[in-house]
Image: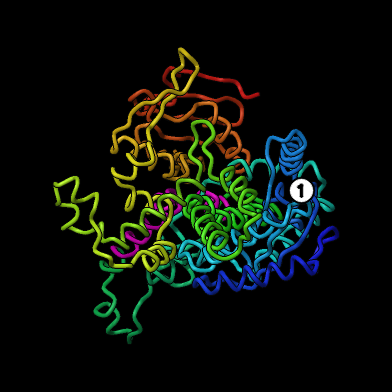
Amino acid sequence: MHGFTNTNLPPDLRILKEEIEAHARAYGLDFYETIFEVIDADDLNEIAAYGGFPTRYPHWSFGMQYEELRKSYDYGLSKIYEMVINNNPCYAYLMRCNNIVDQKLVMAHVYGHCDFFKNNLYFAHTSRKMMDEMANHGARIRDYVEKFGEDEVESFMDRCMSIDDLIDIHSTAIKRREDVSRYDFSAKHGEDESGRTKRFKSKDYMDEYINPPQVLRAEEDEDRKRREHTEHSFPEQSEKDVLLFLMEHAPLKAWQRDVLGIIRDEAYYFMPQAQTKIMNEGWASYWHTTIMTQKALTGNEVVDYADHHSGTVAMHGPRINPYKLGLELLRDIEHRWDTGKFGPEYDNCDDIEKKRSWNLNLGLGRKKIFEVRRIHNDITFIDTFLTPEFCERTKMFSYAFVEQSGQYVIESRAFEQIKQRLLFSLTNFGKPWIYVKNGNFRNRGELLLWHQHNGLDLKLDYARDTLTNLQLIWSRPVHLETILEGKATVLSYDGTEHSQNELGEKDDTRRNGTVKAR
């Protein structure tokens, strides 16, 4: 597949692979064929910098990511033990210097991921031939670089990659509209090729009765108004997939439209991994612990395994460790459904001691977590299964940053506050919801966006950078409606300067603030 990999596992690792795979299938895991490749640490860092795809298109940001990973590994700050790709077949990378216990643990962890990729509903729309598609994307972009120059292509890619999160993460499950760039209004509204309202066929002496002139004139007036409205104001309703709107309506060259489409396709491919980070890592960790402790460990390997596993689930700093939270919550679900600690009877019980010793011996835990793995993402997972008892037992708390001290402090140990903070951080990956509101704003071809305000103001420097890149793609002024400090505000960029006006101010009124573009 590429130069520095070795798909032919050495005999000892091939035996381990067959052993771990047999254990995984015996537990009910279902996955595509998995190909393990043994590579050196530097090669693994390089592949990781490309998002796991060594044949991906070239871009300077991947080089920066590689340098960060390489230095972090050289200084002993972090180490990538494994990487697995959602594909059919799945590709997984093993570091050559790992000891035998680590290799077994990584294989068991990988099979958990592969099962999740294949069976979780949020991955159902993803391409299972992405390794080939990424190679194709890379070839097309390299061809554009040769034709139009590295600086021009890379500069355009910079703009597109900076807004690659402006997609509709729910569009894979909900069909918002027809998948066409322009609607055929003549067909929809009964017009002939000249744009006139169609007349029914009739004999001359019956024409004024079959096609009354006053009715035709009224219909033509209505159609004319509809066309004018459509031409001057679009889309018909707010569009969440900003990248798709730009592909359809921005004045792009053919190669630019293709590059934007490539970046959009890859954004949708990687999206489920962000939507299910806690569940996916928790599921893989659950199965590597199960397989290793129940099947694969020998007596003299326990210490090495415990050292590796404890490092994986350790909590460092204020951030949530998805391996830890996902694993513990899956174990909690399994225990609750094994013992019957769910449902109205259990929830309505007020006796704390009775609830603590509650055990109906239902044995439904394993079946339940397989169901959870299939239908949930991180938000629904946390919203459905996080309980006050779990938060208390695992000593969870919410935290906040105090500017005066420059430190994070415990904000609350209340369950509702913890859950709210956690769900808020997961909603749209903590990023703002942005919609296209009008592609012909002010009837001058300007782009108007709308920010769905959820209680948190936009960061102005980020918003201005986004508007700058959007304007370079749209080629006309761009505007963003939002709320800042409780006031409806429009942020604008016309290609020269940034401006900020309270909503309702006219164009010729005093501007609240103007910032020259750099």
Q: Residue furthest top?
A: 404
Query: Of the residues shown, which amino acid type is indicated by label 1?
Result: Glu
**Which residue is at the front of the view, 411 or 151?**
411
Foreground residue among 489 and 15:
15
* Residue marked by disc 1: 46
The magenta stretch spans residue 166: no
The residue located at (42%, 66%) in the rendering is 370
Residue 220 belongs to the span the image colors magenta: yes
Q: Identify the residue at image location x=34%, y=37%.
A: 418
Q: Is residue 403 left or right of residue 368?
A: right
User: What colouring method underlies this structural image?
Assistant: rainbow
User: What percent of the width, then of the height, locates residue 433?
Assistant: 43, 42
Q: Nearer the viewer, residue 504 or 231?
A: 504
Which quadrant of the figure contains the N terminus? Answer: bottom right
Q: Residue at x 57, y 66 (%)?
A: 295
Residue 230 position (above or below residue 494): below
Residue 175 visible to an observer of this rendering? no
Q: Quadrant of the C terminus?
A: top right
Picture quarter containing residue 96?
A: bottom right
Q: Is residue 258 left or right of residue 4?
A: left
Q: Main secondary structure of the magenta part?
A: helix
Tell me the magenta residue range: 218-247
In the rendered image of this protein, does residue 320 appear above or below residue 192?
A: above
The percent coordinates of residue 290 (x first, y second) are 51, 61
